[in-house]
């Protein structure tokens, strides 16, 4: 990646596959599917009935770049909180509803942008499909048919034993057909599983079988480390085939972390413009500086950087100058000092303890210069 300060900039960076064509479904002020950008979702962890705490967490998620937020609605108190939350949230709010059909109507009337329903948990919904479809149509509400392996319809248990991906797909398509029968098509579908292999198989089959937008998720993916890897692998496999219209990384970690991971997955595949990126070496026996600390300190110091710049942090002079030159800004360390590169030129050499503040100052200077030079900076990916 490099900053372009005068040369014509390609409008699009290369991607691994054309996006699979899907219907475009409204979710409040956004859309999911069609030509809408792939959105990043997360879910609040506060009791939804605690309006202030939930809105505070939604504000944090919004600041982190979350596009769509889901809130759980397990009780009438939670349903009663939805009008205030939907009205005050800066991003579309999706109500997550299991078991209780009446909360679906509450959520639609509350002004929620979307409602997630789980066919495995909502037998009672099936005879209310026409009413739900009418209410959603009247309010412009998008739905999500969200199938989970953990709550699969009992009638599909036997199939699940031999063909888990097939059972997930069958559950989703069965519910979809009920909405289709009443002429309603404004829904996305998810078929989540904790095993990335089964999850990928299920989404591949679903994408062959319908043109509804797909909400990707590896459910119960685990704590941050494991969950990030499982989600990245599974989402990467599907997105690299053009499958996926919105993503939710599920981590046993604060939801802001889910958003950060989701955004990075999309940026890594050029499915959204890359922002600040650090290129740092893994360190080795040649390192003449504490690379881990240096990389972490620079990342922390530039975590709020919104301009797309690439900063290289290299532990020695073997690969250091080459990598540092390819970045917008970089350091190659050696003998207790750091050579600071800006756009391929060494601009100064500083003592080790001045490397981090110098990189941060230069990054901010570059960001300011870039803003003035281009107005809206764009990324060129080589
Ligand atoms: S840049 Fe130097 S210290 Fe870092 S991994 Fe490469 S050889 Fe090792």
Image (tube, grey):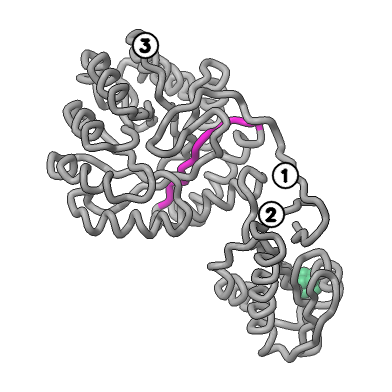
Characterize the local packing of mark 2: few (<14), some (14-19) or many (20 or more) Cα atoms within 10 angstroms: many
The local secondary structure at tag 3 comes to loop
Q: Residue furthest left?
A: 76
Residue at disc 2, secondary structure: loop
Cα–Cα span, label 1 and label 2: 8 Å
For the question of whether residue 203 can be seen, the reply is yes
Is 157 above or below relative to 375? above
Q: What percent of the width, then of the height, locates residue 380? A: 75, 52
Q: Quadrant of the N terminus?
A: bottom right
Q: Provide residue 207's location: percent of width, then percent of height.
A: 55, 22
Residue at mark 2 to residue at mark 3: CA–CA distance: 42 Å
- Image point (27%, 46%), residue name: 87
Q: Position of residue 375 (x, y in %)?
A: 65, 60
Residue 274, by quadrant, is: bottom right
Q: Which mark is residue 295?
A: none
User: In front: 152, or 53?
Assistant: 53
Q: Which mark is residue 11?
A: 1
Q: Position of residue 175 (x, y in %)?
A: 35, 17
Q: Magenta span covers which residues? A: 241-251
Residue ID for mark 2: 378
* Residue 255, placed above or below residue 190: below
Q: Secondary structure at mark 1?
A: loop
* Lower position in the chain sequence, tag 1 or tag 2: 1
> Which is the main secondary structure of the residues drawn in magenta?
loop
Q: Is residue 76 left or right of residue 231?
A: left
Q: Residues within 10 Å of mark 1 (few under 14, many from 20)?
A: few
Residue ID at (62%, 75%): 298
């Amino acid at each position: 990646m490099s900053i372009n300060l005068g040369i014509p900039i390609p409008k699009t960076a290369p991607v691994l596959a054309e996006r699979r064509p899907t219907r475009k479904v409204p979710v409040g002020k956004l859309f999911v599917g069609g030509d809408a950008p792939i959105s990043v979702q997360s879910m609040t962890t506060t009791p939804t009935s605690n309006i202030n705490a939930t809105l505070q967490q939604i504000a944090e998620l919004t600041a982190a770049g979350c596009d769509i937020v889901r809130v759980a609605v397990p009780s009438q108190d939670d349903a009663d909180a939805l009008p205030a939350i939907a009205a005050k949230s800066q991003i579309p709010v999706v109500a997550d509803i299991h078991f209780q059909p009446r909360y679906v109507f509450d959520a639609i009337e509350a002004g929620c942008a979307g409602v997630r329903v789980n066919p495995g948990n909502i037998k009672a919904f099936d005879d209310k499909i026409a009413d739900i479809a009418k209410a959603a149509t009247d309010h412009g509400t998008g739905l999500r048919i969200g199938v989970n392996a953990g709550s699969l319809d009992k009638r599909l248990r036997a199939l699940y034993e031999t063909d888990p991906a097939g059972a997930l797909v069958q559950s989703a398509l069965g519910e979809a057909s009920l909405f289709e029968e009443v002429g309603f098509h404004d829904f996305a579908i998810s078929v989540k599983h904790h095993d990335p292999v089964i999850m990928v198989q299920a989404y591949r089959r679903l994408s062959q079988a319908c043109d509804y937008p797909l909400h990707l998720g590896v459910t119960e993916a685990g704590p941050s480390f494991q969950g990030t890897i499982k989600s990245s692998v599974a989402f990467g496999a599907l997105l690299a085939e053009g499958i996926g219209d919105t993503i939710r990384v599920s981590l046993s970690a604060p939801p802001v972390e889910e958003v950060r991971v989701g955004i990075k997955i999309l940026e890594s595949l050029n499915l959204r413009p890359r922002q600040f990126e650090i290129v740092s070496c893994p360190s080795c026996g040649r390192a003449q500086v504490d690379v881990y600390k240096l990389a972490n300190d620079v990342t922390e110091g530039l975590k709020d950087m919104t301009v797309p710049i690439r900063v290289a942090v290299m532990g020695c002079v073997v690969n250091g100058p080459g990598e540092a030159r390819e970045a917008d800004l970089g350091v190659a360390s050696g003998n207790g000092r750091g050579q600071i590169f800006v756009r391929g030129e060494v601009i100064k050499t500083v003592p080790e303890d001045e490397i981090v503040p110098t990189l941060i100052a230069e990054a901010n200077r570059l960001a300011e210069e870039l803003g003035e030079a281009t107005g809206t900076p764009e990324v060129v990916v080589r």
